[in-house]
Structures are given as C-alpha cells and as structure tokens.
Image (cartoon, helix red, strand yellow):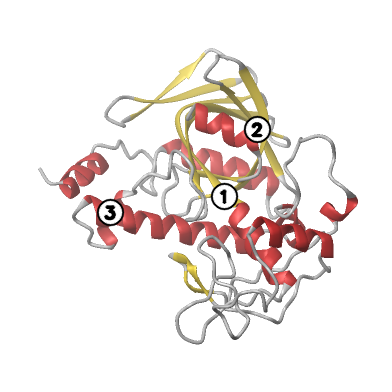
C-alpha cells in the first residue's frame, strides 16, 4: 500500500456523522459559537489545562481565532513564539484540554485533544501541523516529501490568512516583550499600539513567506518607538544601510533577517522601521492548532440538564452517547 493509499484509507475510516462531512460535534460547537458571539470582535479566551514533563499541572488562557474551514475537526488559536509559558507547555506535552464556557446559551464544552504549532518557517518548533488528506489529494502529492511540502504550504497560507484577519491592536501586541515576564519592560516597549497588515504586497506567494517584496508605503497606523526598532535591529543583526561592504546599494543580506535581499528587483530595505517591526511581529505570530479527540458538551438550560459525550476510537471513528447530567 502506498502512502497516498494509506492516507485515503484513513480518511474513509472516519465516521462522518454530520451533513457537511465532519463529525456531528463540529456543527454543535460552531452553532454555539455563532449563537454566543455572532459578529462580535471581542477576544474569546479559553482555558487550557495540561501537565509538564515533571507532572506539574498548568492552567493558561488562550485566545480563540477561528475554525479551520477546510476541516471542521480543527480549532485555530493564537500563539506568540515569545510566550515561553504557553510554548513550553505545548512542546513538553502535546495532549491537553480546553474548557469553553458559552456566556449566553449556558452551555460549556470540555475538549481533550492534541495541539500542533504552525509557526513561521524560520522558527523551529515541535509538533508541526498534520498532513490533511484532502490537501494532499488536491496537490497530487504521492511521496512523503511532496505531501509534507504541500501541507507546509497549506498551513502557511492559513497563518497568513489569519494574520490578515487580526485587529490592528492585536497585531501590535506581537511586538511586545514576553507576556508574564518580570520585571515589566520600559514604556518604549509598548509604544506600538496598532499595526496595519503589510503582507498584501510583501509576499510573492502564500506558501513561501521568505519571498518578500519591499513596501515603503502604508506604515503602521501608530508610529513605532525608535528604541523598539533599534532593539529589533540588534535582535536581527541589522545595521545601517552603509555598513555592509558587499552591498553597494545599502541593502543588508543576512540569512535570518526579515529584510534579506531577494533575487531580481524585489528587495526589502532595512531603512523602513515600520516594515521591520511588522515582519518581526508576523514571524512571532503562530497558529496553535487543536484537534479534539474527546468532547463533553453540557447544556444547563433544559431541565434536567443534558450532557453529551463524543469519543473517538483508535481507527478515528466517532461515537456519541448521552450521560447523566
């Protein structure tokens, strides 16, 4: 059996209970989300519980971002590569639990599953997102390397898509110091309070974020701190435009710099503070992908209350049962 046939068999073994082709709980959860939040732009926080390698229990708050439209079994959450508390928790234990309390409908979801980290290509993390069968099939990828490449391109396009959906204030927070660290950074670290998306003409294709073009217009809606930009230049080993003897035009080309020169006329210049800040914020932005494996749905509105349990077996088939409230 080829690897592609194995993927197709895994897909066919799923017990597709919902009319949209995904397990029934996906519609239940998405309907509850729509009922409770509608088109509200207020952030949605869930509680994440997990255990470290040493057995210590951790309880953190994570921000919900979206449902994966291409596969209803996956939830997308926000993660900053600088958030060492959350990052180390996930990298030490891929399995965790999410608690989601719906404020209006008086119901909650307790989800147990696996986390995956969709980060910038230049970032190195554990537990990269899984290869989705329909993505592999669409790209006609038959060998493992081609499947992984198609998967990486797909997930990077999702990261870019969600970055563009973020409010300007949320984007700006990805330039701030590590959340929860002490002592608190100086006021200059938090002077970037809003950041416009600058990827529309800075990425030649959604699957390769290293192919970036310059955009000297459309700066951030609020000016960035000179001291913040200076610290970012130092972090990315960026110097002044005339300090590189190998670049007569003044562009700096370093392997890890978001302002590396690109073949042809499409080059990123290092004399745009807003662009530097934006690129580093975008690199800090990750999607925390969550795939539930067991779900408890509790509804307190009816009398008696209703408790529904969704579980999967080793073959990936879903079963639904009602339990005592």
Residue sitting at x 57%, y 44%: 31
Q: Which mark is residue 147?
A: 3
The CA distance from mark 1 to mark 3 is 21 Å
In which quadrant is the N terminus drawn? top left
Secondary element type, mark 1 = strand
**Relative vertical location of residue 279 with respect to residue 284 in this rendering, above or below:** below
State whether residue 26 is above or below residue 197: above
The residue where tag 2 is placed is 85
Q: Residue at 30% across / 36% down in the picture? A: 15
Compared with 102, 70 (above or below) is: below
Q: With 103 as the anchor, is 20 left or right in this view?
A: left
Label 2 CA crowd tier, 10 Å (few <14, some 14–19, many 20+) = some
> In the drawing, what numbered circle is on residue 286?
1
The span from disc 1 to disc 2 (Cα, nearest Å) is: 14 Å
* Occupied quadrant, residue 268: bottom right
Give the x, y percent position of residue 110. 57, 26
Is residue 209 or residue 5 the one in the foreground?
A: 209
Quadrant of res 228: bottom right
Q: Dot 3: few (<14), some (14–19), or many (≥20) neighbours within 10 Å?
A: many
**N-terminal of the two: label 3 or label 2?**
2
Q: Quadrant of residue 30?
A: top right
Q: Seen from this angle, which residue lies furthest left?
A: 1
Taking the view exactly as shown, the residue that stands out farthest to the right is 187
Q: Identify which residue is drawn at 74% across, 62% down.
A: 168
Q: Position of residue 137 (x, y in %)?
A: 25, 57
Numbered disc 2: secondary structure? helix
Disc 1 + disc 2, Cβ < 8 Å: no
């Amino acid at each position: 059996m080829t690897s592609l046939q194995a993927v197709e068999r895994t897909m066919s073994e799923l017990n597709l209970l919902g009319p949209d082709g995904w397990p029934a709980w996906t519609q239940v959860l998405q309907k509850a989300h729509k009922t409770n939040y509608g088109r509200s732009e207020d952030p949605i926080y869930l509680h994440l519980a997990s255990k470290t390698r040493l057995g210590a229990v951790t309880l953190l708050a994570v921000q919900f971002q979206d449902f994966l439209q291409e596969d209803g079994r996956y939830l997308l959450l926000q993660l900053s590569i600088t958030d060492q508390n959350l990052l180390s928790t996930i990298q030490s234990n891929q399995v965790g639990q999410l608690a989601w309390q719906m404020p209006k409908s008086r119901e909650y979801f307790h989800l147990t599953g696996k986390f995956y980290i969709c980060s910038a290509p230049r970032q190195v993390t554990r537990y990269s997102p899984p290869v989705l069968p329909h993505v592999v099939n669409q790209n006609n990828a038959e060998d493992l390397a081609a499947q992984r490449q198609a998967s990486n391109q797909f997930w990077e396009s999702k990261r870019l898509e969600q970055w563009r959906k973020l409010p300007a204030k949320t984007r700006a927070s990805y330039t701030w110091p590590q959340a929860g660290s002490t002592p608190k950074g100086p006021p200059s670290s938090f002077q970037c309070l809003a950041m416009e998306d600058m990827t529309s003409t800075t990425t030649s294709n959604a699957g390769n974020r290293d192919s970036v073009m310059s955009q000297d217009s459309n700066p951030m809606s609020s000016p960035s701190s000179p001291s913040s930009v200076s610290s970012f230049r130092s972090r990315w080993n960026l110097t002044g435009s005339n300090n590189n003897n190998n670049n007569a035009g003044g562009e700096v080309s370093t392997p890890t710099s978001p302002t590396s020169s690109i073949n042809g006329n499409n080059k990123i210049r290092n004399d745009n503070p807003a662009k530097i800040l934006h690129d580093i914020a975008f690199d800090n932005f990750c999607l925390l992908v969550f795939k539930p494996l067991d779900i408890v749905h509790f509804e307190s509105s009816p009398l008696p209350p209703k408790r529904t349990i969704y579980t999967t077996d080793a073959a990936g088939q879903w079963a639904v049962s009602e339990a005592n409230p």
